[in-house]
Image (tube, rainbow, N blue to C red):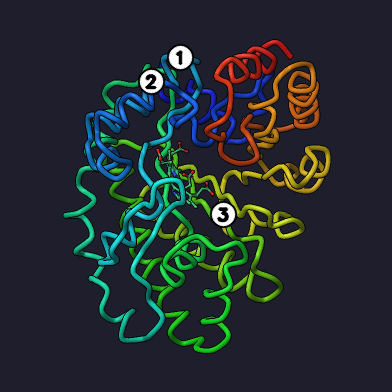
Amino acid sequence: MSKADKTILRALAGETLPTPPIWMMRQAGRYLPEYRATRAQAGDFLSLCYNSDLAAEVTLQPIRRYGFDAAILFADILLLPQALGADLWFETGEGPRLSTITTMAGVKGLKPKEAIHDKLAPIYETVRILARELPRETALIGFAGAPWTVATYMIAGRGTPDQGPAHALKAADRATFSALIDVITEATIDYLSEQVKAGAEVVKLFDSWAGSLKGQDFTDFAVKPAARIITALKARHPGLPVIAFPREAGAGYIGFAKATGADCVAVDNSVSPEWAAENVQKDGCVQGNLAPDHMVTGGQALIDATRRVVDAFRGGPHIFNLGHGITPDADPDNVALMIETVRNA
Ligand SMILES: Cc1c2[nH]c(c1CCC(=O)O)Cc1[nH]c(c(CCC(=O)O)c1C)Cc1[nH]c(c(CCC(=O)O)c1C)Cc1[nH]c(c(C)c1CCC(=O)O)C2
C-alpha cells in the first residue's frame, strides 16, 4: 500500500468514498483503561505529553483496539504557550492553569519563535516514533491550537466559559491583543512545520472557541490567522492537507475552507449534518459530526444518529468523527458500535 491509498488522505484530496474513513477527537483518553494505566505510569498528564515513548504508546492504543483510519499525535494545544515561556500546570479535576499575559511587556517578554523547539523536541520525537510504528494504512495527524483559542488561555490563565478576559483585552488594548495573536500565529507555523518534518501527514488546527468571535472579529482572528498558517505551511510543504476546526462557528463554517485554504472543515454537532452537507461540503471535504454524548448513552439512538451522519454526507468527501472530543465517562463498547455502524452503513 502506498501513502496515496490511505483513506483519510483520499478524502482530504476530495474523493467521495463508499465508506467514510473514521477517527475520533480525544480517541486516546481517559475513557480507555489502557490510557489511564499509561498515564499513571507517566505520573501526570504533562509528563505523559513530554515522554515520547509513552505518548506514542497512548496514541497507538486506540489504533490497536479499534483500527481507526488515523492516529492523532498525543500532546496538547497548551504546550506551545509553555514553550513560548508561559508557566503551565493542570489542576486535578479542574483543567489547565497558565501564567497570564495581558500587557505589551508580557507579549514582548515571550521567547522568540526560534527558541520553542528545545521544549517541544520530545513532541517531534513522538511523531517520529509514530511514523515508524503505525500500521501502513493509518494516517498520522499532527495538530496545534488556533491562535484565538490559544490566546484565550494565555490571557485568562485558564479555560473560561465565555472567553471574557480575551474579549476584554481585545476591546481595551487591541495592539497588545493583536501582537499576541501574531506571536502565536508565527510560532504555530514553525511548530506544525516541525511536526510535518518529523512525519505528520496531515495537520489540524483546533479553534475550540471560534464560536465566540462575531462579525469582523471572526474574520480578523479566526479566518485570517488560519489563512496565514495554512498558506505558510503549504508553501513549505506542498500538498500538505490541513483540517480546520472553527468550533461552533455556525454560519461562519460557510466559505471557511475557501477563505483559509483548508482542505477540510471539521464541524461540531451544533449544526445538523444535512445543513453541513449542503452548506460546507459543497466546497470540499467535511469532518464530523456525531454528538459525543452517544458514546456515553449508546443503543439504538447511537446507531440511528451514526447512520444519519453517514447518509447526510454520502454525496461528497467525508471523514467520520465526533462533533467534539469523546468524554471520560464514555463506554468503550459504544465506540466499537459506532465504528461497526459506519463501516456497515
Ligand atoms: C481546548 C483544548 C485543550 N487541548 C486541546 C484543545 C482543543 C480541542 C478541544 O476543544 O477539546 C486539544 C487536545 N488535547 C489533547 C489532544 C490529543 C489528541 C486527541 O486525542 O484528540 C488534543 C488535540 C489531549 C488531552 N488534553 C487534556 C486531556 C485530559 C488530560 C488527562 O489525562 O487528565 C487529554 C487527553 C487536558 C486538557 N487540555 C485542554 C483542556 C481544557 C484540558 C482539560 C479538560 C479535560 O480534562 O478534558 C486544552
Q: Is residue 213 left or right of residue 150?
A: right
Residue corresponding to mark 2: 34
Q: Residue at x 80, y 26 (%)?
A: 308
- Residue sitting nearer the eye, 194 or 75: 75
- Between residue 223 and residue 120, name the one nearer to us: 120
Location of the N terminus (image quadrant): top left
Give whichever of discs 3 and 2 has the lower sequence position: 2
Against 311, is 64 above or below? above
Q: Mark 3 highlights which residue? A: 208
- Name the residue carrying label 1: 65
Which residue type carries mark 1?
Answer: Arg
Residue 283 marker: none
Q: CA distance from mark 1 to mark 3?
A: 27 Å
Dot 2 amino acid type? Glu
Among the two numbered marks 1 and 3 on one chain, the one whose residue lies closer to the N terminus: 1
Categorize mark 3 by other alpha carbons within 10 Å: few (<14), some (14-19), many (20+): some
User: Within 8 Å: ligand 1 and the Cβ of disc 3?
Assistant: yes
Quadrant of the image occupied by residue 217: bottom right
Residue 6 located left or right of residue 248: left
Residue type (three-letter) at the residue carrying disc 3? Ser
Q: Quadrant of ligand 1?
A: top left
Q: Residue at horizontal 82%, vertical 44%?
A: 275
Residue 105, position in %: x, y? 31, 86
